Each structure stands twice: as structure tokens, then as C-alpha cells.
Image (tube, helix red, strand yellow):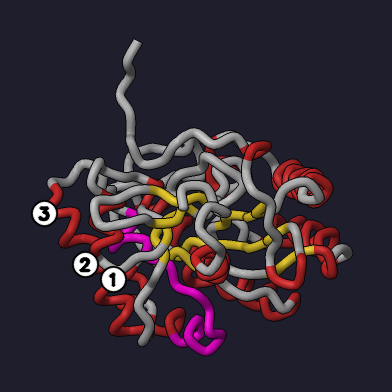
């Protein structure tokens, strides 16, 4: 039986791979990734606080806008408090419409990751020429406003066409986070050379967990703690990546942020046992490892 194939990477069970460690001999890499998004008013795509997906209206627009007006600032203060490096999947429109956000991110020297123009649209239904234009427009805006070209990409809704990886590689991107197939980075093929997949969570993501699957804040935080503890123990056998995906209009609600503090307090009790980093630094490190170490190299 022959099924459709993506031809981007080969099967590689984690138990058969070469061993390696992260910087300073650490075995677990840890990063938080926040999504800073912008939406169209009464049009396009966007999640809803009541039933996940519904008709666009002023209520769900305002609920999402809360993240840029209030929730993000709480989240950034939390990163400052715990000394956590910031990594943000950023819609390019938000940097144009909310200049104070750009100023804060640049001042913190955070990593900005390409996240399309707006989360009111997806790129997987576009013709290749139009998708290339979307990627180029997002990249140009982020580069011009921040002064640094983004090297990582996560498309809105993690949506890809059959050409996305090729277009990203040709646009100068080094890594993507749209293939949740592993707990380690792995190299993927494009028509212009390899691009790295960095683990990004679907399970440990506040949007699908608390908006769509309707987990409570404490339940979500229990999941994060259990995942961290299990991966920290397992990292004695394999180097792993523990990542958390967040949205300021979700995690930035005060009661959720209060619960999330418990997660950070728990993780930081083991601060000497993991590498606190960003996806961009993980990609740089993997690119410097000898060929054959990271799957696909």
C-alpha cells in the first residue's frame, strides 16, 4: 500500500540516534515561546473564548486584543522577574500597529520569529507566488522595524502548503516550528538545502489546551509540571527539548498567570539541570554539531 508522502525527512526512532548534550553538558533545553498576534475586525480568522471558533464579532476581537493591550505586558514583566529570555512568534502587522510592543521587545533583545502578517489569514491555501509574497512581506517588515532578520518561522495556525519549507529556506530562514513530530530537533529537506525543525508543542499550548480542549488553568499547569519532570528524568538517556507555547490573551489573564507562576517556581528549583534558551539558540547549536548527529544531517 502506497500512501502520499511528504519526502521532507526519513523515519528515525529516538532510541537509535547518536547521543549529544546541550551547552555546559546540559541534557534538557527549555524555552518559552509567546505568540503576539493581530486580527481583522469582524472578518477573517480568529479563535473565540466561548466556543473556540465562531463568527467574528466585537466580543472575540476585544478578547484577543486584550493580549496586546494588557496580557503581554504582564507576561513580559514575568519574564523579567524570572530572568527568562523571550522568544515571540510575531505577526508583522502587530509591530506596525503597536509600536510600544516593538520597543519593549527590542529593549529586551528578545528573539522575533516570523509568524505571518496576521492571524486573520492562513497561508496553506495560497498559490506559491502569493505565499512567497506573504513570507517576504512579513520578513521585510520585521527586519525593517526590529533591525534583525528573523531566522525562525511558525505560520499562523501552523499551516503549511506543499511549498512552504522551500519558500522559507529561499527567504533565508534557518528553522521552523510547524512539525510537532519529535522531542529533538531534526533536519528537513527543501529544494534549496536543509532547514531545521525545532520542537514546538501542540499539547503544551495554552490555546488548544484551554480554549479548545477546555482544560482549566491549574490542569494546564499540572500538565506542564508533569511534562517537565518526566522529560528531565528521561533526558539522562537522550537530549530533549521542553517547550511551552503561550498567547498573551490567554495566559495573560490574571488567574492563569497566577497559576503559571507555580510552574515556573517548580521548574526553577532544577535551574542548574537545564539549558534555558530560545529556539534560535537551539537552531544555532544544532547547526554547529558534526554531520550525522542531528537526524537528517
Indicate the secondary structure of the residue bearing disc 1.
Answer: helix
Let me know if residue 99 is in the magenta part: no
The quarter holding residue 169 reads: bottom left
- Numbered range of the magenta stretch: 103-119
Residue 136 circle label: 2
Image position of 256 (left or right of 66)? right
Q: Which quarter of the rendering shows the N terminus? A: top left
The quarter holding residue 171 reads: bottom left
The quarter holding residue 245 reads: bottom right
The residue singled out by tag 1 in the image is 139
Mark pair 3, 2: CA separation: 11 Å
Indicate the secondary structure of the residue bearing disc 2.
Answer: helix
Label 1: few (<14), some or many (≥20) within 10 Å? Answer: many
The residue singled out by tag 3 in the image is 129
The furthest residue to the right? 269
Measuring 40% from the left and 47% from the top, which residue is drawn there? 158
Amino acid at each position: 500500500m502506497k500512501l502520499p508522502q511528504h519526502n521532507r525527512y526519513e523515519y528515525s526512532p529516538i532510541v537509535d540516534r547518536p547521543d549529544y548534550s546541550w551547552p555546559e553538558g546540559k541534557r534538557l533545553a527549555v524555552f518559552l515561546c509567546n505568540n503576539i498576534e493581530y486580527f481583522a475586525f469582524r472578518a477573517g480568522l480568529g479563535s473565540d473564548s466561548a466556543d473556540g471558533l465562531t463568527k467574528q464579532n466585537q466580543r472575540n476581537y476585544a478578547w484577543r486584543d486584550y493580549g496586546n493591550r494588557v496580557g503581554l505586558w504582564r507576561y513580559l514583566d514575568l519574564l523579567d522577574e524570572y530572568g527568562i529570555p523571550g522568544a515571540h512568534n510575531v505577526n508583522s502587522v502587530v509591530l506596525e500597529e503597536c509600536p510600544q510592543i516593538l520597543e519593549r521587545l527590542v529593549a529586551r533583545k528578545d528573539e522575533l520569529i516570523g509568524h505571518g502578517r496576521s492571524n486573520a489569514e492562513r497561508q496553506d491555501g495560497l498559490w506559491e507566488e502569493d505565499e512567497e509574497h506573504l513570507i517576504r512581506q512579513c520578513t521585510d517588515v520585521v527586519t525593517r522595524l526590529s533591525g534583525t532578520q528573523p531566522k525562525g518561522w511558525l505560520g499562523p495556525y501552523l499551516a503549511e502548503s506543499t511549498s512552504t519549507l522551500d519558500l522559507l529556506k529561499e527567504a533565508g530562514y534557518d528553522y521552523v516550528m510547524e512539525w510537532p513530530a519529535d522531542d529533538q530537533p531534526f533536519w528537513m529537506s527543501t529544494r534549496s538545502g536543509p532547514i531545521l525543525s525545532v520542537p514546538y508543542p501542540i499539547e503544551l499550548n495554552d490555546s488548544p489546551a484551554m480554549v479548545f480542549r477546555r482544560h482549566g488553568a491549574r490542569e494546564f499547569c499540572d500538565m506542564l509540571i508533569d511534562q517537565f519532570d518526566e522529560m528531565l528524568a528521561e533526558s539522562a538517556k537522550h537530549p530533549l527539548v521542553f517547550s511551552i507555547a503561550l498567547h498573551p490573551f490567554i495566559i495573560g489573564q490574571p488567574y492563569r498567570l497566577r497559576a503559571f507562576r507555580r510552574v515556573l517556581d517548580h521548574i526553577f528549583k532544577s535551574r542548574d539541570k537545564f539549558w534555558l534558551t530560545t529556539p534560535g539558540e537551539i537552531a544555532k547549536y544544532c547547526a554547529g554539531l558534526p554531520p550525522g548527529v542531528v537526524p537528517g544531517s
